[in-house]
Image (tube, rainbow, N blue to C red):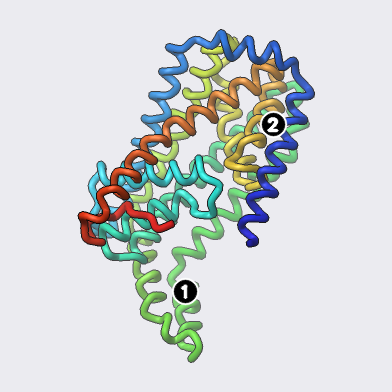
Amino acid sequence: MKSITWNILKIGVTLAIIVFLFSRVDLALMVQHLARANPWLLLIALLLYFLAIAIGAFKWQVLVNAQNLTGSFSELLTYSFVGLFFGNLLPTNVGGDVVRAYGLVRASGRAEAAAISVLVDRLMGLVAFLGAAVVMASLATATLTRGNELEQIEIATVVAATLLILGAALMFSRRVGQRIKSIFDLAPLRRLQPMAQRVYHALQVYRHSYRALALNLMLSASIVIVTTFVWYAVALALDVNISIFYFFLFNPLIAFVLLIPISFNGLGAKEATAFFFFGLVGVPGELAISMSLIFHLIVVLTSLPGGALWWRERSLAPAKTVAESPLQIEN
């Protein structure tokens, strides 16, 4: 019941933001911009986002291999697409990361190691985006004529990045892990002790996997770059003529703001942040919102293969054993 209420609230916030933004722009002009968008540049943007998804699957594979889990690149790419489908399209509390982990668990049979690989993969991705956001917020504050409006965002990114780094340090800390393990010596929690030990050992695998973590972080940074070019291609399709520097500036900042789950799948919140940030460099509101809506559409379109892959596995499930159907998701 709480999840339904929360989803309804997020949909309400999304609608409220969109109505407010649409009241601030010329809708007829915005429709004209969308209708005149260059389809070839939009196709390039779409292909670039598919590339970002593929890089994401590869960087996850680096961590999966460190755990000696069973999972080829094609399998992990499939789980990633299915996760994106459920994460982007459906009003459900089943997150994309949970779906990714579920697929790997069904394939490998090692629940804790699979879940930790997804958790650490998400953590490294956040480190890359927050690191970029901290740097870009500082640059924006120093270079933009209205940079003083970004000072609070700069402070927020620094605080968030600091908390994330501290959280990661605590998560990989052997001393903290031992203390948490001792909690499971208590009688009420003793039956969970074997699972807690497996989680602890799965985490400790990455404590000394410097090469895997470094490679994953570099690949995460490359996703920041690729998605920046997605924004840039969309802008060119709409004939928005500003320096690519601003897209490198605003992409991680927009992603940072969207970490706050106040709207349905980021819709509305993304448009509001694009309206604000691109407005700082003179982009009209109609074009800024158009860019954001197209970017959101690209995210949705690139997740559709996940729905097809899930449906295929679901339709074949009766003819398979549970072990052979890692993508079957119970309703």
Mark 1: amino acid: Arg
Q: Which residue is mark 2?
A: 272
Mark 2: amino acid: Ala
The residue drawn where x is 50% and y is 88% is 188
Quadrant for the C terminus in the image:
bottom left
Q: Which residue is mark 1?
A: 175
The residue drawn where x is 43% and y is 12% is 40
Q: Is residue 276 left or right of residue 225?
A: right
Between 286 and 182, the one lying in front of the other is 286
Q: Is residue 16 left or right of residue 79?
A: right
The residue drawn where x is 71% and y is 17% is 27
Q: Tell me: residue 41, above or below residue 300.
A: above
The residue drawn where x is 56% and y is 43% is 130
Which mark is first along the chain, 2 or 1?
Answer: 1
Instruction: Determine the secondary structure under disc 1.
Output: helix
Could you say where residue 125 lies in the image, as x and y percent from the top left?
46, 45
For residue 253, say whether it is visible. Answer: no
Between 207 and 193, the one lying in front of the other is 193
- The image quadrant of residue 320 is bottom left
Could you say where residue 57 lies in the image, as x and y percent from the top left?
34, 42
* Mark 1 to mark 2 CA distance (whole Å): 43 Å
